[in-house]
Image (cartoon, grey):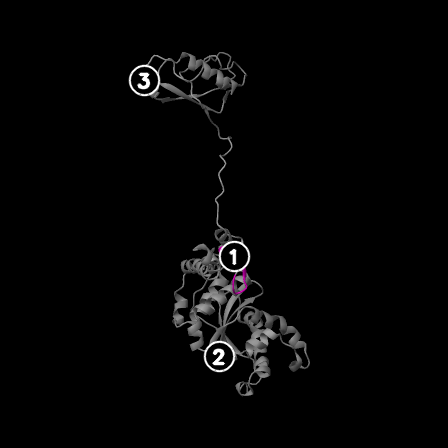
Amino acid sequence: METAAAIHSGVCKDNTDPIKAMVVFVKPVFHTSSKADKEPQSSPTHSPNIVGTRNELVPIGLILYLPVQDNNSEHSNSTAREPDQYFELSDSSPARNREKPNLSQAEARLVADEHLTKCGFLISNKFFVELAKPQQWVSTLHMEVLVSLLSRRLRTTLENHRSAFVDPWFTSHLQAKFRAFNAAKVKSRVRWSEDMQRFIKGSKTEWFKDINTIYAPMIWNDCHWVGLSINLGIWSVEILDLNTDLYDDAKVKRCIEPVVNLLPHLIQRYCTPEFSENHGLQPFGWSRIDGIYKNLRSGDCGPVAMKFLEIQASDKLPDKMAEITDKHVDAFRRQYAMDIYKQCVCPLYSSNVFD
């Protein structure tokens, strides 16, 4: 900068034009020529006495002249005033400090990392990014929130059809209980959780009386989500699997055994005897639905399984499942994320935001 200041000083002394010059300096460029006969070059924008000789590293200052009209000295012979400021153009110059936005308390909460919904879910902003991103694996929490979303969205239809969605805990509980149940000598003494008892015979969720069809997501081997449509009246389970090539029938049988084998025992123990008298403890029948959308990508199984259950539970024709494409999957994943944010997060702060 000392060299650059010297250049500027020289130029200003020689400048008698009433049109002022604003001098802008760039970061020094170093001359590294090793030729012995290289002559210094001069130009209107370079001072001839600052170019180094052989093997020297000497800064070459570049001066940019930006004419500025001096209204006070127009057509005057007075000496032009030196500019008050100089601007150094450098890639390494620090960025200008910016003031942080002053958010209201409601706005700050809206962009917070986590949100505690009225349904009791603690969900983060990352939750929505993961749900909306194609081929991104989803967690059990994603599936629980999706079940809650669809239960509210299809409430009237579910009541008319005597059906209900249930969280993944239902199938997970059956999977966890299966080995101990099989090992029990007196199976009628096996204890079941209070959540299971309330779901089977609740005030508004009594099986067979209020609920005849159960829509449940289920995960196989902790890596593959499927949808189950459990029809209590006809003692059968329909499996909505987006990629039937992953599991052959033998593997599917092992995966679905906890559900089809334990349901009869639960019905016999907690439901009115008349509903099980025709089947006793016979396992539920099961089948995989053919002709539906096949997803060959990884990471989409959770949202697709929920979309299958949504179509199955609504008044839409089951053929709609065959019309789904990969682009549709990308779209409804984003839509699910936006719907959850709108219904679960925005109401938490809307009254304060619009005050």
* Residue 336 drawn at (x, y percent): 45, 61
* Kind of element beneath mark 3: loop
Magenta range: 117-128
Residue 278 counted in the magenta span: no
Toward the viewer: 324 or 245? 324
The disc labelled 3 sits on which kind of residue? Glu
Q: Is residue 281 visible?
A: no
Q: Amino acid at mark 1?
A: Phe
Image mark for residue 151: none
Q: Which residue is mark 1?
A: 127
Q: Position of residue 271 (x, y in %)?
A: 56, 83
Which residue is label 3 attached to? 74
Q: Residue at x 60, y 83 (%)?
A: 269
The residue positioned 49% from the left and 42% from the top of the image is 100
Q: Which numbered dot is residue 212?
A: 2
Q: Nearer the viewer, residue 317 or 315?
A: 315
At 65% across and 82% down in the image, what residue appears? Answer: 188
The quadrant the C terminus occupies is bottom left
237 w.r.t. 29: above or below: below
Point out the tag, 3 or 2, that comes first from the N-terminus.
3
Circle 1 SS class: helix
> In front of the other: label 3 or label 2?
3
Seen from this angle, which residue lies furthest left? 75
Camera-side residue: 219 or 250? 219
